Amino acid sequence: VIVGEFLSGKKNETLSKWGLTPRSQNSYQTPPLTELQRLLWTHHPSTGHVNEVWYIARDKEQLRRMGITHIVNAAAGRFHIDTGAKFYRDLRVDYYGIEADDDPHFDLSIYFYQAARYIRSALNSSRVLVHCAMGISRSATLVLAFLMICENKTLVDAIQTVCKHRGVCPNSGFLKQLQELDMQLVRERGRGEDPLRL
């Protein structure tokens, strides 16, 4: 998932079913898990130009051609996609690895704010590849969280934005964690708080 591609669109892409218009953000309610899953399944385009993300993450020449300068590996570690700062030492690539399992019981939410800060900082002048093994669950979850935290999108808006570029399907546990983040952000923004707190 190349994050910069998502940021050129409108800030307030909406689903009228959920009452998400710029004037009615105060009335937004996080949809139930079943509705979020339906939204993901009904907005499932082809995966786009980077289908086998683990190959791309290991293809240094392709990374150069794509202009990737920062990588978030959501499947880091010896038994996942084993890259790292040493793997990219001959490239000008900054690396951030998260050893996450694609398991509904894995708490990926503990990385939401760290990853969002990293991606936000990197996007100031660079292109970021966020990947896992298949590019549809772990990395998608981190990108959705980034859009919610840094781009002030609701979970529904974030899903719509990502699904315009790539088919994604976070596992049920990750989707529940995103749902909880969405509810938290709605409360914080209702009180005028900055969720990123940079």
Image (cartoon, rainbow, N blue to C red):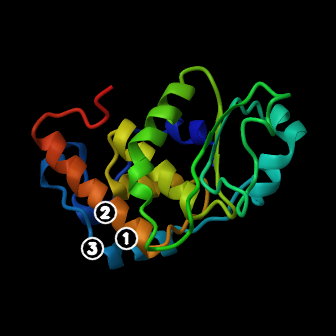
Residue 153 is situated, as x and y percent measured from the top left of the image, at: 34, 45
Q: Which mark is residue 179?
A: 2
The crowding category of the residue bearing disc 3, from other C-alpha atoms within 10 Å (few below 14, some 14 to 19, many at least 20), is few
Mark yes or no: residue 139 visible: yes
Which amino acid does the dot numbered 1 rest on? Leu
Q: Residue furthest right?
A: 61
User: In the displayed structure, would residue 104 be above or below residue 96?
Assistant: below
Who is closer to the viewer here, 110 or 122? 110
Mark pair 1, 3: CA separation: 6 Å
Mark pair 2, 1: CA separation: 9 Å
Name the residue that disc number 3 marks: 32
Mark pair 2, 3: CA separation: 8 Å
Which amino acid does the dot numbered 2 rest on? Gln
Quadrant (top left, top right, bottom left, bottom right) of the C terminus: top left
Tell whether label 3 touches label 1 (CB within 8 Å). Answer: yes
Q: Secondary structure at mark 2?
A: helix
Circle nearer the N terminus (2, 1): 1
Name the residue that disc number 1 marks: 36
Residue 41 is situated, as x and y percent measured from the top left of the image, at: 50, 75
Residue at 34% over, 79% down: 34
Circle nearer the N terminus (2, 3): 3
Tell whether label 1 touches label 2 (CB within 8 Å). Answer: yes
